[in-house]
């Protein structure tokens, strides 16, 4: 059984709790755990695995690496805050493809779908903490996981998908080292705001559909590291990044990104923001024609304007 730190919720008088008999304490703890399942209790899973059908709401504190086991399903309710603390001795997975810091490692399925009024928030406990203050949400061989109306801040790699099928929509990624990282995944990235990250989207291989996103003010908008395939990247606003597109050394073929808006319409001006064949001859060329002359009015999260 996973260990949980039980803390009395508001309305439970601590001196009264200390005076209770052991049997009454056990009964109260049972009630608190039940209440926590519907979001009335802060929980701190720490260096452990969870399995089965799981529901989180309210606030969930994670200290260390927490694994959602294969075959399990985690559903996160609208308005929930997932807070990733410094991991201490419970940073069990640090080598690639994991990251230093507390991680949520999902080998089953995760459904994190908030609403415009109640987005789900993934963050550090310290609002001033820098990017990389927690590891990320690591999806490992998951099917049909989804994120919508969510906010991700201060992670190393906020979402990292490995050989998974995942949908990411109507969400905000800011102040992360990498907003969305994936390989060998079927992934839909649509109607998101990806801004002020070191890298917006980083991937190799993969089968992404990346449409109607605002990818702005990052150091790298796109970082394509190796042999992309079966991809569609259209109708995005990609602008004001230090490098809008950066091709890695294992991308010798041309990379197609037509029908996007780049904040300019002159190809020479747009290509000046790329790291591709024009910089290193062994790389492919980012191909951008035709170019959108105006942003897609439906790009970005429709609820955060």
Image: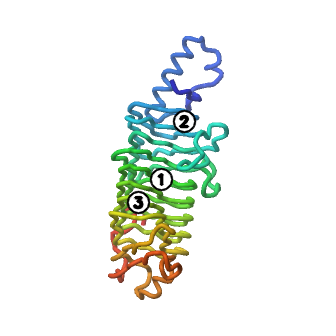
How was the colour assigned to the protein in this rendering?
rainbow
Residue 219 rendering spot, x and y as whole percentages: 56, 70
Seen from the viewer's position, the closer of residues 57 and 245 is 245
Q: CA distance from mark 1 to mark 3?
A: 16 Å
Quadrant (top left, top right, bottom left, bottom right) of the C terminus:
bottom left
Asked if residue 193 is positioned above or below residue 89 in the image, the reply reads below
Label 3 vs 2, first from the N-terminus: 2
Number of other residues with Cα within 10 Å of mark 1, as a class: few under 14, some 14 to 19, many 20 or more = many
Task: In the displayed orientation, state which residue is furthest to the front.
Answer: 282
Taking the spot 44% from the left edge, 61% from the top edge, the residue there is: 204
- Kindly identify which residue carries mark 1: 159
Residue 42 tag number: 2
- Kindly identify which residue carries mark 3: 205
Local secondary structure at mark 3: loop
Label 1 vs 2, first from the N-terminus: 2
Local secondary structure at mark 2: loop
- Between disc 1 and disc 2, the foreground one is 1
Residue 284 rendering spot, x and y as whole percentages: 44, 75
Q: Judge left or right: residue 281 versus residue 290.
A: right
Asked if residue 27 is positioned above or below residue 258 in the image, the reply reads above
Residue 194 rendering spot, x and y as whole percentages: 47, 64
Asked if residue 14 is positioned above or below residue 224 in the image, the reply reads above
Taking the spot 47% from the left edge, 58% from the top edge, the residue there is: 180
């Amino acid at each position: 059984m996973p260990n949980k730190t039980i803390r009395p919720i508001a309305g439970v008088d601590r001196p009264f709790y200390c005076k209770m008999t052991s049997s009454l304490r056990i009964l109260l703890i049972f009630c608190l755990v039940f209440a926590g399942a519907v979001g009335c209790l802060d929980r701190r899973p720490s260096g452990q695995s969870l399995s089965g059908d799981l529901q989180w709401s309210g606030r969930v504190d994670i200290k260390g690496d927490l694994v959602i086991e294969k075959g399990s399903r985690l559903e996160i309710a609208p308005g929930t805050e997932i807070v990733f603390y410094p991991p201490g001795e419970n940073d069990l997975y640090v080598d690639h493809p994991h990251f230093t810091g507390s991680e949520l490692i999902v080998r089953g399925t995760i459904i994190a779908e908030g609403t415009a009024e109640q987005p789900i928030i993934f963050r550090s406990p310290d609002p001033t903490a820098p990017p990389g203050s927690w590891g990320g949400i690591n999806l490992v061989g998951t099917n049909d996981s989804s994120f919508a109306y969510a906010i991700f801040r201060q992670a190393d790699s906020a979402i990292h998908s490995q050989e998974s099928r995942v949908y990411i929509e109507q969400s905000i990624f800011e102040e992360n080292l990498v907003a969305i990282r994936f390989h060998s995944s079927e992934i839909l990235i649509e109607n998101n705001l990806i801004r002020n990250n070191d890298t917006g989207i980083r991937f190799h291989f993969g089968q992404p559909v990346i449409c109607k996103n605002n990818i702005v003010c990052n150091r790298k908008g796109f970082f394509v590291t190796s042999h992309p395939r079966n991809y569609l990247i259209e109708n995005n606003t990609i602008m004001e990044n230090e490098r809008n597109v950066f091709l890695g050394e294992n991308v010798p073929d041309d990379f197609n990104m037509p029908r996007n808006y780049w904040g300019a319409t002159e190809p020479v001006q747009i290509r000046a923001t790329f790291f591709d064949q024009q910089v290193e001859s062994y790389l492919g060329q980012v191909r951008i024609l035709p170019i959108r002359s105006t942003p897609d009015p439906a790009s970005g999260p429709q609820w955060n304007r």
